[in-house]
Image: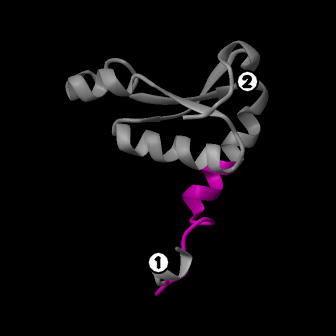
Amino acid sequence: MSNFRVHDAGDFETVAQFLDPIEAQLACSCLEAAGVPATVADANLVQTNSLWAIAVGGVRVRVAASRLAEAREVLAAFDRGDFALPEGCDPDEWA
């Protein structure tokens, strides 16, 4: 979870929606790692009753409106695989 204060962020916009709360948390973490403060909305509601996911619009990843374009670029890079580890990478080398 980011450390920015809500009242400093201005209006929030939804940058992505997911049916799976884990995917939303992953996208939020990716944004925060790239320096874009983000938050996840409705994850607890969807986890409580997954049948409500479609009714509430899924789990939303939200960012300050002023960072929306940057957030979209980061998520597009993530979807393209720009942040993937190289094939055959040994995770112990990164520790």
- Residue 61, percent from left and from top: 53, 32
Which residue, as the protein is rendered here, is positioned at the far front? Answer: 95
Marks 1 and 2, the one that precedes in the sequence = 2
Of 28 and 3, nearer the camera is 3
The residue indicated by pointer 2 is: 65
2 is higher (above) or lower (below) than 85: above
Q: Are marks 1 and 2 in contact (CB under 8 Å)?
A: no
42 is higher (above) or lower (below) than 32: above
Quadrant of residue 78 within the rendered picture: bottom right
In magenta stretch: residue 54: no
In magenta stretch: residue 77: yes
- Looking at the rendered structure, the kind of residue marked 1 is Pro
Say left or right for 59 vs 10: left
* Crowd class of label 1 (few under 14; some 14 to 19; many from 20; radius 10 Å): few
Give the SS element for disc 2: helix
Q: How many marks?
A: 2
- Looking at the rendered structure, the kind of residue marked 2 is Ala
The residue indicated by pointer 1 is: 91
Residue name at image x 75 percent, y 33 percent: 67
Which residue, as the protein is rendered here, is positioned at the far right? Answer: 66
Of 52 and 7, nearer the camera is 7
Please state the extent of the stretch shown in magenta in the rendering. Answer: 74-89
- Residue 3, percent from left and from top: 64, 31
Give the SS element for disc 1: helix
Which residue, as the protein is rendered here, is positioned at the far top? Answer: 7
Residue name at image x 22 percent, y 23 percent: 48
Of 4 and 87, nearer the camera is 4
Which residue, as the protein is rendered here, is positioned at the far bottom? Answer: 88
- Residue 72, percent from left and from top: 67, 42
Q: Report the quarter where the N terminus lies.
A: top right
Quadrant of residue 80 within the rendered picture: bottom right
